[in-house]
Amino acid sequence: MTIKEFIRLSLLKPNKIWTILQNPLKKIKGIFFLLVLIISIPNFLRANEFIGKIAENIKVVEQKFPELSVKDGKLVADQQSGFLYRSDAFNVLFDPTGKSTDNDVSAESNQGIPTIAFLQDHMALDTVLNSAKISYSDIGELNKEMIHQYIQEFNANLWMVLLGVMLFMFVYNSLLLYVILIIVGFIVRLFAALFMGAWIQMPTSVSKQLTMAAAFLPAVLYSLIAILGVGGGISIFYYLLVTTTFNWLLGMKEFIDIESKKKQ
């Protein structure tokens, strides 16, 4: 069986996946990583959208910074130039007056959104899990042009952030799918023995192919549901666990019936 035939069978004839027993694939790594890619697509799209929002918000924030400098370790700028910028990606607090405190920075991060603050005496960063203070004396010179340069450098490297997030998602989903396939492989054999009167024995590689074939259609449907934004944010773990188990039992029912008749 070729990969193309495997995919066509899994998508169009899930009740016939038992025929893989007669003509299994020689290699299964390609199918496994294709499945991982399919369930990762919604994550990739969300990550790309999120990084895009960060880039847009950074451009807006950049325009809000006034002329500024650091003197005697304190931020100096027009007293009326302070601002608080909130977004879904991050918050920025700029206050040269000294009225805002670290508690205000923490309060802005309470919603789970990282906050960076330019306070009168220091810079503060609160990422919800961790917080840090940076003294202006440690930074040295600071002005609007330098902030502009930092922002440009950060924007130029956003693609690396996106790539890192996508790689993390792919590895995470690989582990998740592997665990699901192991659990399903155990459950379906137990169900077949208890409720269908069949104890199915087969090579491990073939067993994995049957489970992946059973997972193919649910994986495609999950990605479509997630991309379209319907389904109420269903858990991929429980969704694939249940639907793959059901699909496997459906796809093997005919084979079990045939084998049962042979024994009669």
Image (cartoon, rainbow, N blue to C red):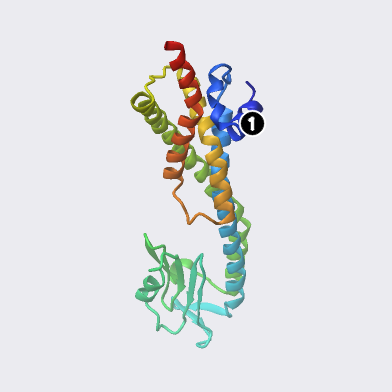
Figure quadrant of the C terminus: top left
- In screen coordinates, is 101 left or right of 144? left
Q: Residue at x 44, y 65 (%)?
A: 113
* Residue 3 position by quadrant: top right
From the top left corner, tell me how far across and down residue 59 is, in percent: 62, 69
Q: Please, what secondary structure does the residue beneath circle 1 have?
A: helix
- In screen coordinates, is 206 left or right of 155? left
Q: Residue at x 41, y 62 (%)?
A: 127
* Residue 185 position by quadrant: top left
Residue 54 visible to an observer of this rendering: yes
Where 195 falls versus 95 (above or below)?
above
Figure quadrant of the N terminus: top right
Quick one: 33 or 185, which is closer to the camera? 185
Where 34 falls versus 234 (above or below)?
above
Tag count in the figure?
A: 1
Q: Residue at x 58, y 35 (%)?
A: 34
* Residue 104 position by quadrant: bottom left
Residue 40 visible to an observer of this rendering: no
Q: Dot 1 corresponds to which residue? A: 8
> How dense is the environment of label 1, judged by Cα within 10 Å: few (below 14), some, or many (20 and up)?
some
Quick one: 230 or 38, which is closer to the camera? 230
Q: Amino acid at mark 1?
A: Arg
